[in-house]
Amino acid sequence: MIWLPNATKTRFMTRRTTPTEQSPPSSGRRLDSFDRAILRIVQQDARTPQRRIAEAVNLSAAAVQRRIAAMEAAGVIVRNVALVDPEALGQGITSIVQVNLRDERAPTVDAAKALFRARPEVQQCYYVTGGVSFVLVIVTSDMRAYEALTRELFAENDCIASYGSLIALDRVKVDTGIVIPPPG
């Protein structure tokens, strides 16, 4: 069980947050120690029953439910998903692809973003700096499917100047969790 200072299980008492207990500026929601403890748990397993979360963080189940709903509304919790083993579905090729655009004008970048976002094989897409325009993580069934996809997305695309692929030999670590620092 995680014990936090000033924890209460009643709805009549509330814990005030200090000015240092803030969330990222984009969400506009302040995250206190309870919110952060809840996030650590739901990042590991979003199906954890709220009563178990409540016991772990020393709050009531209703308080946990309200906090989760508030973090969802504020965009702190973006969505809840299931992580699927690609090999279990015959998707055995994972590729990391570096893409260079012909130019970095807004229409070209926006078109590339839309193209990559629309393809289900593109698992992750990052618009980056450092001599490369995009870094993609692509999952396909086999090399034949990967070759067909690269032709369509890169080789036959006038917006793409060049691309390079790295084929993963082993999925050493795959995680979506982020480090949740303590407040302050």
Image (cartoon, helix red, strand yellow):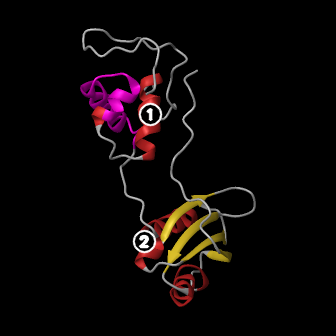
How many numbered callouts?
A: 2
Name which residue type carries label 1: Ser
Name which residue type carries label 2: Pro
Quick one: SS at disc 1?
A: loop
| Residue 81 shows in this picture | yes
Q: Observer-nearest residue: 110 or 43?
A: 43
- Decide if residue 161 is on the left or right side of residue 6: right
> Against 122, is 128 above or below?
above
Q: Observer-nearest residue: 93 or 106?
A: 93
Mark on residue 120?
2
The picture places residue 155, in percent across and down from the top left corner, at: 61, 84
The picture places residue 60, in percent across and down from the top left corner, at: 28, 23
Could you tell me which residue is drawn at 59 percent across and 80 percent down? 154
- Decide if residue 56 is on the left or right side of residue 151: left
Label 1, residues with CA under 10 Å away: few <14, some 14-19, many ≥20: some
> Against 45, is 18 above or below?
above
Is 145 in the magenta?
no
Mark on residue 27?
1
> Against 40, is 7 above or below?
above
